[in-house]
Structure formats: C-alpha cells, structure tokens
Amino acid sequence: MHVFVGDQNRPPNNTERRKLIWLSMSSSILVSILVTIIPMYIVYGTEIFQQIYQSIEIINKAILIVITFIILVIYYFFLRINFGWGARTYSRIRN
C-alpha cells in the first residue's frame, strides 16, 4: 500500500485494489507454504509429510474446508481494509 501510494500519489481505485488484494494474498500464501515446507523437509525429511497426510485424512474434509475458507475470508477483509481505508488515510497524510 505504501509503495503504491508513494509511486502513484493516490490510493488505488477499485480495480487496482482488487488486484493488489489477490496478489498479496497469493504471495503471502505461497511464502507461508514455502517457509513451512522447506524447513520441515530439511529437519524431518519426507516422514513428516506422511504423518501430516495421515492426520489430515482423520479430519473431516468439510471442517477443514470451512476453516480454510474462514481464514482466507478474514485475511481478505483485512487486506481490503488496508488497501481501501488504509491507503486513503496514508494518501491524505502524505499529501
């Protein structure tokens, strides 16, 4: 947000905000997965992934999907607030 407002001297419009939100979510999820998987592989090897898979098999898939969806929705709304209200506030303070 700070980079966009700093470069453009304005808050993002709705189209730009949606793109920023989805790109931020995608990159955050990807980085989180990589930062979790790589150290686990280095420390524990492939056995840990088999244990995780077995644990996931025990959990009800619907519950897992609902929990994941709720977390993503919360994350989306925080980014939406940041790239909307936060960007407008930062733009007013900066200008």
Image (cartoon, rainbow, N blue to C red):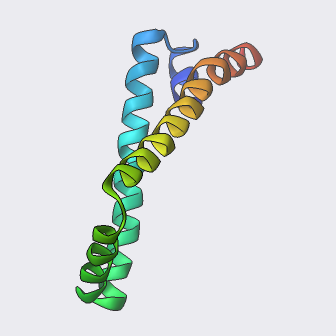
As displayed, is residue 54 above or below residue 63? below
Kindly identify the residue that appears in the image at 54 percent across and 32 percent down.
79
- State the image coordinates of residue 16 (x, y, percent, origin top left): 41, 16
Tell me the quarter of the image containing the N terminus: top right
**Residue 74 at what x, y percent from top left?**
55, 37
State the image coordinates of residue 53 (x, y, percent, origin top left): 26, 73
Which corner quadrant of the image does residue 55 belong to? bottom left
Percent coordinates x, y for residue 56 in the rendering: 32, 68
Quadrant placement of the C terminus: top right
Does residue 92 appear left or right of residue 23 in this picture? Answer: right
4 and 22: which one is in front? 22
Which residue sits at x=24%, y=81%?
50
Relative to residue 8, is residue 64 drawn left or right? left
Quadrant of res 45:
bottom left
Q: Residue at x 36, y 89 (%)?
A: 43
- Residue 87, above or below 42: above
Q: Residue at x 46, y 10 (%)?
A: 14
